[in-house]
Image: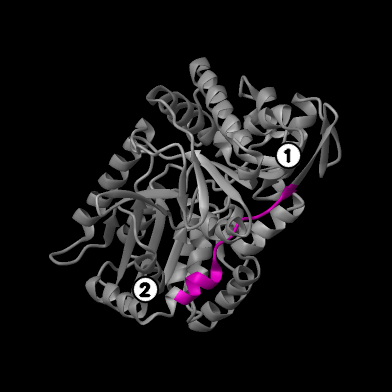
Amino acid sequence: MPERTRSELVVVSNRLPVTRARRGGNDDWDLSPGGLVSALTPVLQKRTSTWVGWPGPGSGAPRRLESQGIQLRPVHLTRSQVEHYYEGFSNRTIWPLYHDAVRPAEYHRIWWASYVEANRLFATATIDEAARGAIVWIHDYHLQLAPRMIRERRPDLRIGFFLHIPFPPQELFAQIPWRRQILEGLLGADVIGFQTTVGARNFTVLCRRYAGAEGSRDELRLHGHTSRVAAFPISIDTQEFARVAATPEVVRLAGEIRTRLGNPRRVLLGVDRLDYTKGIDLRLLVFEELLREKKIDPRDCVLVQVAVPSREQVHAYQTLRNEVERLVGSINGSFGDVGRSPVHYLHRSFAMPELVALYRAADVMLVTPVRDGMNLVAKEYVASRIDERGALVLSELTGAAHELRAALQVNPYDVDGLKEVFVRALELPESEQARRMIALRRVVERHHVHAWANAFLEGLGA
């Protein structure tokens, strides 16, 4: 590839941020909506840039794509690589372990071998795209080996890595048979970012113990290379959520949602990927107990639970869906009536206007994961409440809890505590709703996704 065609900035993630659309008999590739895409698109459009990633199963993507002025470099994976690298090591080894082993992690050598192989494919594609002295920004747990692989072949590059999920403590991470290789892989980056200072501190301790790194809490040295370690809490496009929330379409739709629900006195809302870390099943059990104990009246209070489909080919997720749907059926069968259901369960994705309308329609937002790196739903709800009303119930075990201190925080494993906070949120006076929401909105307005991206790139010297 001629040097002049290479990119000054290369973003690397497991998935390309595009969806295929058929127009006039031809394939077009549209940028997918989302916080990361909205944050990075303006940065990518300012310079010659490429986004490297997997286009998804059976996409038929060509070797090179372009969307909204951004070059896209697909990394094609075989069915075996998807099964072992993605579904296996990434989502059945790393994902559960990094989320406090909510489900037992599995360790298989064939998965590890595929993880190494896939990381090498992403690294090679990145090296092909990067101009001399370029900035490379690698994202998330699928690609923890890529920083060192790239550095070994292209020491001229400035490499950043950001982990979107939690980084576990020593007693959990120590279980991984390939712990040293993962730590050394990450230490190939110049800047290694985490959602919280706790995650950054865990990483530093582990690097000293298992990788032989030296240095302080903020800087580590290994094999003559220095890495900066820091927390960069990710956020959302706050202004965009506020803008959408103010549109007549969304205001009208929020009213229609409450009408379709039967105009209850109170609406509780949960919006989650259908993932075992999100605490959906525990939330439903708490709601059921409150109904049984008559602390909530099903005639004037409903729960809307959105469960966005996720990793449906993985057995643990299939099991969770069956359990959630069983609980929904049990609650509605026991406490519902003709034309009235206490739980409205929606197993699908929502476009942004529909989602914001749900946020505006809800009196109480339930964000109760048993572990989460950040949780952007909590921030989206706050940004959407331009009326400065509503109550946010937030798990203490999310990264968002470190910032959104004015939320009603709760231990998601404490059933009695959850019940108490759910009832409190439903009865929160408007004056307290306003006081808390104003404080929460101040946080998300100041710490938005564009500030996050700029802070990380500045740390890389971009």
CB atoms at circles 1 and 2 under 8 Å apart? Answer: no
Query: Cα distance, mark 1 to mark 2?
Result: 48 Å
- Where is residue 155 shown, x and y percent of the image? 76, 33
Which mark identifies residue 301? none
Task: For residue 183, say whether it is visible.
Answer: no
Task: For residue 456, say whether it is visible.
Answer: yes
Q: In this view, does 308 lie to the left or right of 221?
A: left
Q: Which amino acid does label 1 sit on?
A: Leu
Residue 330 on the magenta span: no
Nearer to us: label 1 or label 2: 1
Q: Which residue is at the front of the view, 2 or 42?
A: 2
Which mark identifies residue 361? 2
User: Residue at coordinates 50% horizontally, 45% vertically from top-left?
Assistant: 72
Q: Which residue is at the front of the view, 308 or 174?
A: 308
User: Residue at coordinates 63% horizontally, 21% vertically from top-left?
Assistant: 178
In the rendered structure, which segment of residues is drawn in magenta?
A: 230-243
In this rendering, the answer to whether 302 lies above or below 184 is below
Residue 156 found in image quarter:
top right
Q: What element carries label 1?
A: loop
